[in-house]
Amino acid sequence: MRRMCAVSVWLLLVASVARAQVPPPPPPPPPLAVQVGPGRDVPLKTGTATIRGRVVADGSNAPVSRVDIRIGSAESPAGKTATTDANGRYELTGLPAGKFTLSASKPNYVRVAYGQTRPQGQGKVIELADGQTLANISFVLQRTGAITGHIVDEFGDPVTDVQVMAMRSQFFNGERRMMPAGGRPAETNDLGDYRIYGLAPGQYYITATLRNLMMGGATDDRSAYSPTYYPGTGSVAEAQRLTIAAGQTINGVNMTLLPVRTSRITGKALDAEGKPLAGAMVVAMERMGMMAMAMRSPAQVRPDGGFTLTGITPGNYILRIGMPGLDQTAVTPVTVTDGDITDVELIATRPSTIRGRVLVERGATPPRASTLQLAASSSEPMMGGGGPARLNDDFTFELKAPAGHYNIRLMGQLDTWHLHAVRLNGIDVTDTGIDLPPNAIVSDVAVEMTTKPSGATGSVVDENGQPARDAWVVMFAQDAQRWASQTRYTGAGRPNANNVYTVNVPAGDYFIVAVTDIEPGEWNDPDVLAQLRERATRVTIADGERKTVDLKVAR
């Protein structure tokens, strides 16, 4: 019983040289000025200005209580918050003079920025003077949308416990994938009914999946259901996209699950010494987007090392082996079509090691080592990775990761420090990455940091010459060969409260363009970049140069 409990815990865990470089001196004392960084709420400076207003529901004058009102500035994007009372009123006091943005949010309502011109758009900037009171900064909140429907099997009978999700087609890691798109995922009840709610206005695909999470074993039952897209197809290309408006409920999005014949995956699981990993678990994890994983038919390894995964529907999977306390891992990709897969060998290995040192540019005051971390990032997240690893006081580091191909990435004070280069034995591997063999130690890795990243900055205006905050500035290499996945040669940014954008890229020749008709992340799609190229401006960025490029929104 104790082993089965530990196995259950494990399954839950599874499902869820350009500039001169010098080693940094001993770390300095903590800085007096607090920098704004990722994941850190830094309060606004205090002042004498006040903003107050009221929040009401769309279509009525009914107040909305418990709405979070957040104010931010270019210097402190996570500045200060207030909550509306029973009358829908809020007040933000003690504000300094400056330029600010304001937003309102509450569960089951569409988040809105003050002065925005379209759903999910950027809001207008509010300018405050010392001692000023703005008393009518009010919001109208729209309810989010919902989609309801009914799921049946091929005989017309309702199916319970079917996972139904709203998805979007997004470009990631070199290909289009269906990605979860917000809203609350639903499961069908005893009548086969479901309801997805909390959907912001937009376009969605609906997918229904019946998962089999029972323990694998010998069975002759080969019946199952493949993931089904509305209106009832297994092909993403044939899926129908639904458009939902604020507050709208679309009913009758019904589907019949598609029956398929399942396959088996059989093989052996061995440890690093070639001995059977008896009692360990083998899990088939289906790729369902960037990081989402759907687990199928986990199986326990038999005393002879053999395992049998059953109920596997066609698709691309990652086989992973592990158990609580096991310091070895084995991961391998498998593609299932219409037949069984046999003789799979999962040979576990202990983590390999990447060792090195962080270097800072000459003349710069280094940060405290404890404020920085490094990670080994794989091009396929489901295959694993390493870190994050903290730096030692002497700025050396050690990263543990399974065998694979990795890029080293900097984490921590990314507002101040930026990755300049990663070198292995003096060779630049920043973009090509590091091959990490099994049971190996890769040493002499130098991670160079800089406080002077290359890139572009500037303002964005519309066709009338007015500030255009509701735009994306996309910067991408002129060489299309660099439009690869996880590339540093493509970046994007939005204007802040001061109407200033910033995009960091390595030195090189680029296209740069400001657009409004683009979804976040679409600049990773080579087809999109090929279209943007026709509207873009050419610019050359030198190492350490932050070039000022003012832009007009391109049609």
Image: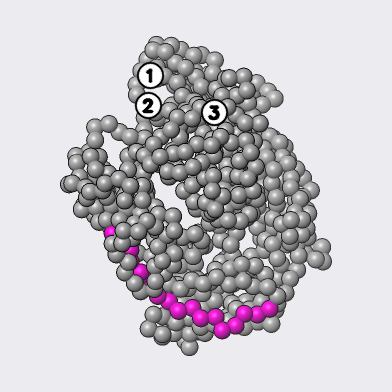
Disc 1 target residue? 96
x, y (%) of residue 421?
A: 36, 51
Whether residue 437 can be seen here: yes
Instruction: Please tell me which residue lies in front, 71 or 483.
Output: 483
Q: Is residue 511 above or below residue 426?
A: above
Q: Earlier in the sequence, mark 2 or mark 3?
A: 2
Picture residue at 36% right of the left edge, 35% below the top = 36
Q: Nearer the viewer, mark 1 or mark 3?
A: 3
Q: Is residue 344 magenta?
A: yes
Question: Tag 1's secondary structure?
Answer: loop
Picture residue at 37% right of the left edge, 56% below the top = 428
Q: Which numbered disc covers residue 60?
A: none
Give the quadrant of the N terminus: bottom left
How far apart in space, not on screen, are marks 1 and 3 (Cα)?
30 Å
Amino acid marked by disc 2 = Leu
Contact check, label 1 and label 2, Cβ < 8 Å: yes
Residue found at the very far right of the displayed protein: 155
| Left or right side of 430 for 398 | left
Disc 3 target residue? 551
Question: Tag 3's secondary structure?
Answer: strand
Q: Is residue 44 above or below residue 292?
A: above
Q: Quadrant of residue 504?
A: top left
x, y (%) of residue 506?
A: 43, 45
Question: Dot 2 surroundings within 10 Å: few (below 14), some, or many (20 or more)?
Answer: some
Q: Earlier in the sequence, mark 1 or mark 3?
A: 1
Q: Which portion, as a residue range, is magenta?
A: 339-356
How far apart in space, not on screen, are marks 1 and 2 (Cα)?
8 Å
Give the quadrant of the C terminus: top right
Disc 2 target residue? 44
